[in-house]
Image (spheres, rainbow, N blue to C red):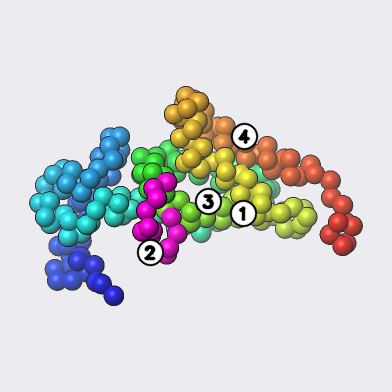
Amino acid sequence: MEVPYESTGRIRQKQRTRDALLGAARALLDGGHTPTVEQSADAAGISRTTAYRYFPNQRELLLAAIPAIDRPSLLGPDAPDDVRARLESVMAEQTEILRRWEPQLRAALRLSLEQEPRTPRDGRPVLRQGRAITWIEDALAPLAESHPHIDRRRLAVAIRAGSGIEAWVWMVDIAAVSRKEAAALMRESAQALLAAALAQPHDPASCGG
């Protein structure tokens, strides 16, 4: 197994160099650019030859620049029990993530759409990690007792479909709504889907009950 360049020799110094390259790449992303390795190296004041030792191509650089949001839940320790309030809290935080990390998430979307044979280390494309679905399912957890007939996974997928970077890009770029309005529409859509699921009649006979 190949050992990453920054994991050998002067590790601390190499970590600082790597961080500088990533900082430059993220700054360029914030400015609306999709940086190459050369551009990031120039912005960081690092030689291009050195930069390529850390990131052999643009794809590897952008993958590293994308934020790793590995939080198991977007709910705090004092999360409410009411499913509507829980979903509102999760959606508010999720839209804030979209706003805060928009340039990086746009880059992730571009990478996910590329027909490249290489994928992240776990073998899945960048935007197919399922984190947001897990966060939404967490918000819907009270339905397990109050409405056990509702397919929470299916509902979470439906909500995620209208509340990710893909929908954000469509609303901002195509529908030309403000980012504030895009966030509001995502939250309202999530609540509408939840309300529709709660309103569906439950036939115990269909579940063998």
Distance CA(mark 4)–CA(mark 2): 36 Å
Residue 91, image quadrant: top right
Instruction: Give coordinates of residue 98: x percent, y percent.
Output: 45, 41
Give the residue type that dot 1 points to: Glu
Seen at 62% across and 34% down, the residue is: 188
Q: Residues within 10 Å of mark 4 (few under 14, many from 20)?
A: some
Q: Quadrant of the N terminus?
A: bottom left
Q: Residue furthest bottom?
A: 1
Is 2 or 93 nearer to us in this picture? 2
Instruction: Give coordinates of residue 35: x percent, y percent.
Output: 25, 43
Q: Is 150 on the left-hand or right-hand side of 43?
A: right
Is 173 or 132 nearer to us in this picture? 173
Is 188 or 169 nearer to us in this picture? 169
Residue 85, image quadrant: top right
First in residue order: circle 1 vs circle 4: 1
Q: Bounds of the magenta span?
A: 113-125
Q: Residues within 10 Å of mark 1 (few under 14, many from 20)?
A: many
Distance CA(mark 3)–CA(mark 4): 17 Å
Give the residue type that dot 3 points to: Ala
Q: Main secondary structure of the magenta part?
A: loop
First in residue order: circle 2 vs circle 3: 2
In terms of secondary structure, where does tag 4 sit? Answer: helix
Is 83 or 105 nearer to us in this picture? 105
Which residue in the structure is indicated by mark 1?
A: 137
Which residue in the structure is indicated by mark 2?
A: 121
Instruction: Give coordinates of residue 45: x percent, y percent.
Output: 11, 47
